[in-house]
Image: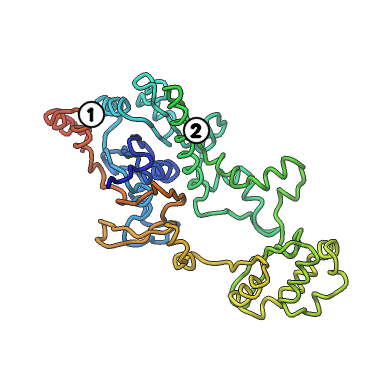
Amino acid sequence: MTTQRAALDGIRVIDLTVWFQGPVAAQHLADFGAEVIHVERPKGGDQGRGVRSIKALPVGDWNQYFLVINRNKKSLAVDLKQPQGREILYRLAEKSDVFLSNLAAENLAAWGLTADALHAVNPRLVYAVTSGYGRWATATKPAFDMTVQALTGLMNRLGEPGEPPIYLGMGSGDAFGGLLGALGILIALQQRRRTGKGQIVDASLYGAQLLLAAPTLQAYLATGDARYARQRSRRTPENPLWNPYPAHDRWLFLCVPNDDTSYATLRRVLGDPPAAREPRFASAAGRREHATALVDALDPVFRERSAEDWTARLRAEDLAVSPIGTLRDLAEDPQAWANDYLLETFCEEVKRTVTVRGLPIGLSKTPGRVESLGPELGQDTELLLADLLGYTWDEIGALKDAKVIP
C-alpha cells in the first residue's frame, strides 16, 4: 500500500517574507506539501520571531505568532547584502517554482531580486508579491491592516452612528490577503503548465479588504445609495427581524425574513407578547417603517431567557438564530475540531502539545497537515546549500567565515 503524495508535493517556494501576510500565504502552500524555504536575515531573522505579545498582551510562553504562520517550512539564513548571499538566492531560484516576497520593492531591487532578474535566471518562476496597496499603488506607506482598512471605507461602515468607526480587527486583511496570495500562486502555476512560463502575481491588503466588503461594496457601486456606505444602528435596521438582540446572558443574532408567516412564528415562540401584537407591526411594511419601535418592544422579551434557551426554541421552529460566541466558545466547539479548523501539534520550544489554528480548506484524498511548527533560525541552511545547491563543505565554511550565513 502506497502513501498518497501531498497535493503540492514537488513545488518549491522561496519565501522571502516577514510578519504575517506574506508568511501566511506561504504557510497555506506548505500545509499542502510544498517545500517552502523561509529566507531570513542571519541576525534576528524574520521580525515575527520577536513577537511575544499582541497590543501589550502576552500570548503565552511560546512564540505562537511566528511558529504557527511558518509551520511546515525550512529556514535558510543568508545575508542578501553580500554578493555571495545574492548568488545563493539566484542558484535557489534556478531550482524553484515560486519566489514570494512582501518586502519593499526598493529592497528587492537593491538586492537584484526583481522579477526581470529572477526570470532571467528561471523563466518558469512564478514571482509573487503580497503588498499593501497593489502593484500599481500610488500610496505605499503605511501599509498596516488597520490603515488599509481605514482607506477602503470598510471601517467607516462599522459601529453605531455618531460613534467612532470600528476596526474589524483580528488581522483579517493580512490573513485574507495571504490566502489570496496563495490562490494567485496556484493559478499562475496552472497557467505555467500550459505555457512553460512564469508570471508576476500580486495580492494586497487593499484588494483583500475590498473582497471582505464585497456584498456591501457591490450594492453601493450598483446604486450609489449612502445606506450601504454609512454606519447603521441596530435600532434602525432595514429588517428588525434580522438583527442582534440581548438575551439574559449574552447577545443573539436573529436572522428571520420580514414576512408575515415568519413573524407569526416568531411571535408564537416569544410567547406572543402584547407589544409585538400592535397593529403597526402587522405587515412587513409596517415592521420596516416602525423598526425602532419593534426593536424596543422585542429587547425586553429576549432578555427574559438565556441565549441557549432562545436558540433551542427558535431553531425548533426553523427560525435561524445563533448566540454571539467568544473565542473560548470556539476553542471548545466540537465541529471546529472535527473539521481540522483547530489542531494539536507538538511545540519543540516548550516541549509539549499546543493548540493551533488548523486548515481552513479540506481535501478528501490529499488533506493538508501540520507536521512541524516554525523552524529555528537558519536550521536548514547548510543542508540546503550542500544537498540542493551543490556547495562543497569547504565553500560552506568560507561563507560562514564571511558571515554570509550563520
Q: Secondary structure at mark 2?
A: strand
Q: Which mark is residue 202?
A: 2
Where 384 falls versus 153 (above or below)? above
Classify 10 Å Cα crowding around label 1: few (below 14), some (14-19), many (20 and above): some
Give coordinates of residue 321: x percent, y percent: 64, 67
- Which residue sits furthest left? 394
Name the mark on residue 327. Answer: none
Residue 115 lies, with reference to residue 152, above or below; the image says: above
State which quarter of the image contains the C terminus: top left
Say whether residue 403 is left or right of residue 171: left
For the point 68% across and 67% down, the residue is 319
Percent position of residue 303, x then y: 66, 77
Judge whether 60 appears above or below 186 on screen: below
Helix, strand or loop for disc 1: loop
User: Foreground residue, 344 or 314?
Assistant: 314
| Residue at 48% from the left image edge and 35% from the top image edge | 184
What's the distance in space between the residues labelled 2 and 1, CA to CA?
28 Å
- Marked residue nearer the N-terminal end (2 or 1): 2
Residue 256: give x, y in percent of width and height.
Answer: 71, 64
What residue is disc 1 on?
389
Amino acid type, mark 1: Leu
* Residue kind at label 2, given as amino acid type: Asp
In terms of image quadrants, where is residue 235? bottom right
Q: Where residue 324 sits in the image (x, y, percent)?
A: 58, 66
Whether the residues at callouts 2 and 1 have beta carbons within 8 Å, the answer is no
Q: Tell me the colour scheme of the image.
A: rainbow
What is the tally of numbered marks visible in this picture? 2
